[in-house]
Amino acid sequence: MGGEVDKGKIYALSDVSKHSSREDCWLVINGKVYDVTRFMEDHPGGDEVLLAVTGKDASNDFEDVGHSSTAKAMMEEYYVGEIDASTIPAKVKYTPPKQPHYNQDKTTDFVIKILQFLVPLAILGLAVVLNEGVFREVAVSSCRVVGDLEFLPFIAHGSPLLGRHPAGWVQRGQGDLIVYIAMGRMESFWGDDAQVFRPERLIDEEGMYCHESPFKFTAFQHQPSS
Ligand code: HEM
C-alpha cells in the first residue's frame, strides 16, 4: 500500500511517480490523484494498464476507454488529493513537417518557360528595329537640319570591313571609310530633283562613287576624298 496519505493535499507529478509499482500505484485522472493500489487486482481492465500510466496524467486513457458511471463512482474510494497542474508537462502538439509546395498547376511553369525564351528574343528584335530606325532617322534629320545640303557617305575603296551604312545604300566590300560631302542644290547642276534627298545620284551602277565636278559641291567647295 502507499502508506499514510493526506487526503486533499496538492501533489506534484513527481510525488505521484514515486508510487509506481504494483504494490504502490498512484495515478492522475482529470486533476485528481488516485491511489489504486488496492484496486490493481480487481480492475476489470487489468493492473498492467494502470501501471503503464502511473506517474503520468492518465485522463485521456481513462476517457478513451469510456468508463461507465459505476466506474466513475468507484473512483471516489481511491481519491487521495489534487495534482499541481503546473507540474504536468504541456502536451506537445504535433505539427507535421512542412512539405515543399507541390504545384499541381503546370500552366504557370509553362508560361514562365515560354516567357524566358520569348522576352530575350523580343528585346533583340526591338534592338534591331530601333537601331535601324534611329540610324535612318539620324541620317535623314541631319540633311533636314542642313537645309539645302545633301550628305553622301563616300566609302573608300579596297576594304572589305564595312558591311553597310545606316542609310542603306553602301554595299558590302566598298570600304571602311565614310566621308560626308556636301552638295549644292542648284537645279542647273543637279536637275529638277535637286531639292530631293537622293544621295544615290552620286553612286554608279556598280555602287561606286561617280566623280563629279568639284564645282557642283558649291556649299563648301567640297569634293569627295578617299
Ligand atoms: C481509479 C481509476 C479507475 C477505475 C475506478 C476504473 C474502473 C473500471 C471499471 C469499473 C471497469 C469496467 C468497465 C466499466 O464499468 O466501465 C474498467 C474497465 C477498464 N478500465 Fe478502468 N478504471 C480506472 C482507471 C483506468 C485507467 C487509468 C485505465 C487506462 C489506462 C483503465 C483502463 C480500463 C480498461 C482497458 C478497461 C477494460 C474495458 C473493456 O474491457 O471494455 N482504467 N475500469
Image: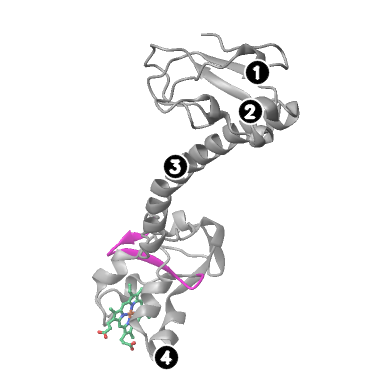
Q: How many marks?
A: 4
Q: Spatial distance from mark 1 to mark 3, Cα to Cα?
A: 49 Å
Q: In the rendered view, would you say 45 is above or below 49?
A: below
Residue 76 in picture, x, y percent from top left: 46, 81
First-in-chain label (2 vs 3): 3
Q: Which residue is mark 2?
A: 190
Q: The residue under label 1 is which amino acid type?
A: Lys
First-in-chain label (2 vs 1): 2
Q: Which residues are magenta?
A: 18-31
- Residue 29 within the magenta-colored segment of the rendering: yes
Q: The residue under label 3 is which amino acid type?
A: Pro
Q: Are marks 3 and 4 in contact (CB under 8 Å)?
A: no
Q: In the rendered view, would you say 76 is above or below 169?
A: below
Foreground: disc 4 or disc 1 = 1
Q: Secondary structure at mark 4?
A: helix
Q: Secondary structure at mark 1?
A: helix
On the rendering, which quadrant does ligand 1 occupy? bottom left
Q: Which residue is mark 4?
A: 69
Q: The residue under label 2 is which amino acid type?
A: Trp
First-in-chain label (1 vs 3): 3
First-in-chain label (3 vs 4): 4
**Ligand 1 contact, mark 2 (Cβ < 8 Å):** no
**Image quadrant assignment for residue 27:** bottom left
Q: Which residue is mark 1?
A: 216
First-in-chain label (4 vs 1): 4
Q: Spatial distance from mark 4 to mark 1, Cα to Cα?
A: 125 Å
Q: Are marks 1 and 3 in contact (CB under 8 Å)?
A: no
Q: Is residue 43 visible?
A: yes
Foreground: disc 4 or disc 2 = 2
* Residue at screen point 47% across, 12% down: 156
